[in-house]
Image: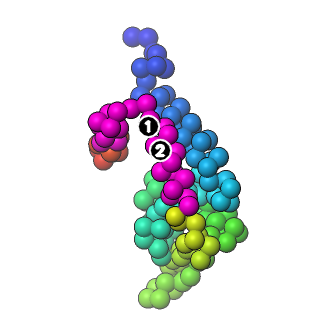
Amino acid sequence: MTFSKDQSAGYLINHLARVFARRLSARIKPLGLTPGTFPALLELWEKDGLTQKQLVERLDIEQATMANTLARMERDGLIRRQKDDSDGRIQRIWLTDRAHALHAPATAAATGENQAALAPLSEAERAQFLALMRKILAAR
C-alpha cells in the first residue's frame, strides 16, 4: 500500500492545525496573546486556580512545555502563582485582571476563526465534523 498524504488523517489534521494556529495567531496577536498561551487561558477561564499538573493533564502537553508557557504568561501579566491554602507545596495558577479582561475579545476572535474555517461546510457537516473529532479524542 502506498502512503498518500491526502489520505492520511495524521497529515491532514496536522496541516489543518497549523492553518488554524496561524490564522488564530493573526486574530489574537493584537490582544497580546499567542496560540501557545491560548489553550491554558481557555482552561483557566473555565476554572481558575488550577495547578500546573492539572493544566498538563487537561491540555495533554509535556510538563516542561507547560512550565515555559506559564513563565511567559506570568511575565506577560496574565497569571499569578499562589501557594494553595491547605497545602503549601502546591501552587495554584490564577488569572490576573488583565487576563480576565481578555476573555471576551479572545474567545470572540477564536469564534470568528472557527466560523471562517468551517464556512465551506454545511451546518450538518460542521456538526458531524466536530462530533467526529470529539469521538476520536474521547477514545484516546
Residue 92 position (above or below residue 67): below
Q: Would you say residue 79 is visible in this rendering? A: no
Q: Position of residue 74 (x, y in %)?
A: 65, 70
What type is the residue that disc 2 sits on?
Asn
User: Compared to 14, does 48 lie above or below?
Assistant: below
Relative to 24, residue 107 above or below: below
Say which of 29 and 122 sits in front: 122
**Which residue extends farthest top?**
1
Front residue (pair 57, 130): 130
Quarter the N terminus occupies: top left
Q: Which residues are magenta?
A: 105-132
Depth order, front residue of 68/12: 12
Which structural element holds mark 2?
Answer: helix
Q: What residue does disc 2 label?
A: 114
Q: According to the image, what is the colour scheme of the structure?
A: rainbow
Q: Write down the residue under mark 1.
A: 118
In which quarter of the view is residue 133 placed? top left
Residue 123: give x, y in percent of width and height: 32, 38
Give the Cα separation between the discs numbered 1 and 2: 6 Å
Q: Residue, x 42% and y 71% (percent of image)?
A: 47
**Residue sitting at x 51%, y 48%:** 112
Amino acid type at mark 1: Leu
Q: Residue at x 67, y 53 (%)?
A: 29
Residue 126 occupies which quadrant of the picture? top left
Q: Is residue 100 left or right of residue 59?
A: right
* Residue located farthest toward the right when viewing the structure as drawn: 75
Mark 1: which secondary structure?
Answer: helix
Labelled pair 1, 2 in contact (Cβ < 8 Å): yes
